[in-house]
Structure formats: structure tokens, C-alpha cells
Image: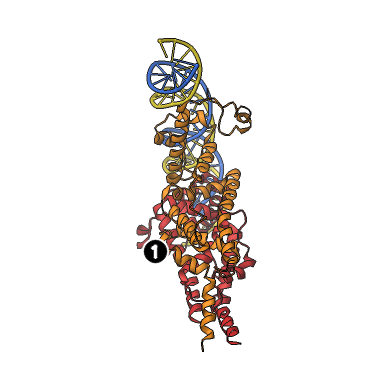
Chain colours: A orange, B red, C yellow, D blue
Amino acid sequence: MLRAHARDLSETMRDADIEKPADPRIARSRQVILRAALEELGEAGYGAFTIESVAARAGVGKSTIYRHWPDKLALVSDAFKTLHEVAAPDLVTGSPRERLKRILQHVAETVVSSTFSACIPALIDAAERDRDLRKFHHQFQRQARKPLIRLISDGVAAGEFASVDPELAALALLGVIFFRRLMTNAPFDPRRIDDLIDAVLPAASRNARLLLAARQP
Amino acid sequence: MLRAHARDLSETMRDADIEKPADPRIARSRQVILRAALEELGEAGYGAFTIESVAARAGVGKSTIYRHWPDKLALVSDAFKTLHEVAAPDLVTGSPRERLKRILQHVAETVVSSTFSACIPALIDAAERDRDLRKFHHQFQRQARKPLIRLISDGVAAGEFASVDPELAALALLGVIFFRRLMTNAPFDPRRIDDLIDAVLPAASRNARLLLAARQP
DNA sequence: TGGATGTGATACGTTGACGTATCGCTACGA
DNA sequence: TCGTAGCGATACGTCAACGTATCACATCCA
């Protein structure tokens, strides 16, 4: 028998430590269903999402889905959570500017393709309708912005960027990428990240260069 | 009898010039239905939008809606179109910076409240699913950005803003406002427009001031 | 190998929304 | 004032998806 539904956290907690070696069929089902669910969310959106389409796409009986999730919302919720398990780029090596470029390039590339991109509108819509999903969405976004804000702070402190409000700058950088994806017919080209950084975070050295130039008669 | 459905443009074209004085009940019905439709789109979203809810909210018979629009999509489409008929702020008086501030403040205020704001997620979602709506959405966004881009160009040419790609700057300014609305739990505060402009479009005079300061020994 | 258990298929009752049709009622304007 | 035409209410058939139940079969692991 199955242990419990994904949402019954409090019930599963108690025997979580008694880790029985689980039937591999369970993990396999969950994985293939979650994957199909994300693809459906990307194509159909949150509103038109149906359990039956997911079952068909996953090549799985409808009953199997209901065995693992109590209802539609639980599945959608879980699917969005797995969506966010993405690999982060290297944030240690190089100057703040180099690290910033790497992180933004990663974001831009994620947004031009992949399941993630297709799900953005669905996630926004879902967050607007369901209280829990909204909380999760905003919370996650907040966490995702943190390293970026930190990076900008470091860059400003190190004198590499002109002085700005790091949070505002982070919003502007991400805003451009997402705004283009959602409001225009062409997403932001990852190869133009340098231009983006230059526009929003002009190098402090630019002023320095001007100062220098001004000293020459 | 009603002339024709909203979508049958080609059919209505021919007798459009024979302008009969229309029954005022028609205009009244259309108006109250479109208004209710927008409210529904804001609350329920594109996916969960139903004709019956609109009828109930508008205090109108379901049949009346079908008398004016052939189906759901036509109504949604028309509703989004009326959504965009908003008053533009004064774009003539004052310096580029002042005009820019006025336009962005208008955008930010529109986004913090009003039916428009509630419909953004629905519109994004709808644009993702329906080809015609997507075309309309992108086309409209493009038009809406034009005056902003023009304004920035003028400001740069006049030496009021530091040299930037006007299109990129416009994306950054609008991006911040929309990104905050869609990805965080608090929209952008219209009172912080000055900070926003300073961050994305630093005044050329700042460099000028630095240059000036550098000339002093 | 054999019992336990997850699985796919399928059928089922229920609900909610679509879009159509009908029918008196009422507001319009000639 | 009178016929026309839009209006609301309501009932209808259809369909798609929900979530449940059942059952033979396949897979696991003891």
C-alpha cells in the first residue's frame, strides 16, 4: 500500500525515519507523472490543466495519479516545486562582474528555452488564483534574487559598479529578461547580457575614466 | 434584429456607412457585459473564465451575451481590447525627465490598482494560449513602449540622460514595475519613480558634475 | 516461487459550463 | 400608440473533466 499522499506531511513525518526500501515502481510513477504535469502546465496553462491529459501524456492510468496525489491542486503544486530544482551556475570564481554575467546568462538561457520558460505564464496565473501557490512563488522568487543582490552589493562595495540600490538593480536586470519574455514576441538574447549589464550597472571605472580624461587639458 | 456579431467584420463593413440610429439598449448591454467580463478575467483568470459568471455579474441573461458575441473567445478578446483604452498622461509639457517621470508614474499607478492590474496575469496567460490574442498583446505592448523609447531618445540627445540604448532602458524601467507586480508580493511604489529613473537612467549631468569637479584642482 | 502491492484499463455517477432554443415582457422610436 | 426588436429567464442536450471503484495483470522482494 502507498504510504500517504504527498500533502499529508504531518502523517508521513512520524514514520519518515523508518525508511522502508520503497518499491521502485512508486518513484518511477511519480517522476514520469510530474514530468508530464509540467509539460501540460506549459502547454495548456493552469486553467486548462487536466488530470486526464497528464495521465495520457505520461502513459499512465488516471488511477495511478490519484494514488499519489489527493487532487489536482496537489499535483500542480508538486509539479511547480520540482520545476524550481535547477542547477545554479558557478558563483565563486571571477570578479563580481564576471559572476554577475554568468548568473544572468543562466537566467536568460533558462528563459529562452526549456520547460521552465513555458511554465512561467502558468505559474504567474496559478500564483494569482491560489493562495498557497502565490506564497510559494513569491517566497521562491525572493530566494532566487538573493545571490544576485548580494553579488551586486559586493560589486558596488569593491568599486566595480557605480553606486546603486542593489535590490533595484537586481529587479531591473531580471525585469528586462522576464518582461521581454512575457510582453514581446522575442525573449531576451542571452548574448546581449553584456549590454544589459552596461545599461543597468555602468562600471564605476567609466566615471573614473571620465575624471581622468577631464584632468588632461 | 442585431446587426452582426462583433467578429464578423467583413459582413458588417458593407452596410457600416448606412448608420442606422442604434437602439440604446444595445450599447448599454455591450458596455455592462464588457465591464463584467474584465472583472471576471481579473478574478478568475483566462482559464476559469465562464460566460455564465459574466452574465450573473452583469445582471444580464446569458442569451444576451450570445446575441452580441459568437462565443467565449470573442468576448474575451473584445474585453482585453477595451481594457487598453486608457487615458495617457501629458507628454508635451516639461523636460524629458519630467515627462518620463509622469509616464512611469502613470504606469506604476495603473499597475498598483485597477482592473488593468488584475487582468495582467490573465492577459499573459491568454496570450500564451491563443495565437490572435498573443499577436494583439505583443502588438499593443510594442505601441505602448514607443512613446517611452522616444522620450528616452530625446533625453539622451538633449544631453539630459547618460548615453544608453533607449529600447533597453525602456525595458528596464517597465520591467522593474511589472516584475515586481508579478514576482513579488508588493508592487512597485509609484512614489519611488525618481529612484527608479536615477538607477536606470543616471543623469548625464552627474558625469558633467564629476567632470566639473575634476577640473577644480 | 508466492504473496503482497502497485498498475493500467475501464466503467461510473456527478458536476459545471457550453451554446441553442423558446417565450412572454418591455423599451424604443416611427 | 403600436409594431418591432432587444431583453431576462429558463429549460435543454451535449460534452468534458472530476474523483471513485473494481479487477485482472505485472512487478517486486522475501
Q: Chain of mark 1?
A: B
Q: Is residue B42 visible?
A: yes
Q: Which residue is painted at 50% across and 63% down in the image?
A: A97
Secondary structure found at label 1: helix
Q: Which picture quadrant has residue B77? A: bottom left
- Callout 1 crowding tier (Cα within 10 Å): few <14, some 14–19, many ≥20: few
Position of the C terminus of chain B by quadrant? bottom right
In front of the other: A11 or C30: A11
Residue A131 vertical position relative to residue B83 in the rendered view, above or below = above
Q: Quadrant of residue B2?
A: bottom left
Give the tally of numbered discs.
Answer: 1
Kindly tell me whether residue B3 is visible in this rendering: no
Task: Determine whether B134 is above or below A158 in the image.
Answer: above
Q: Is residue B212 above or below residue A166?
A: below
Q: Name the spot of residue B16 as percent of width and height, x first.
A: 39, 63
Q: Which residue position is annotated with label 1?
A: B16
Q: Residue lying farthest bottom?
A: A217
Q: Position of residue A138 (x, y in %)?
A: 59, 50
Q: Residue at x 50, y 40 (%)?
A: A79
Closer to the camera, A24 or A10?
A24
- Which amino acid lies under the numbered mark 1 shown in the image of this protein? Ala
Q: Nearer the viewer, residue A166 or A126?
A: A166
The location of residue A139, given as percent across then percent down, is 60, 49
Q: Residue drawn at (46%, 35%), measured in percent from left and top?
A: A31
**Which sits in the foreground, B24 or A73?**
A73
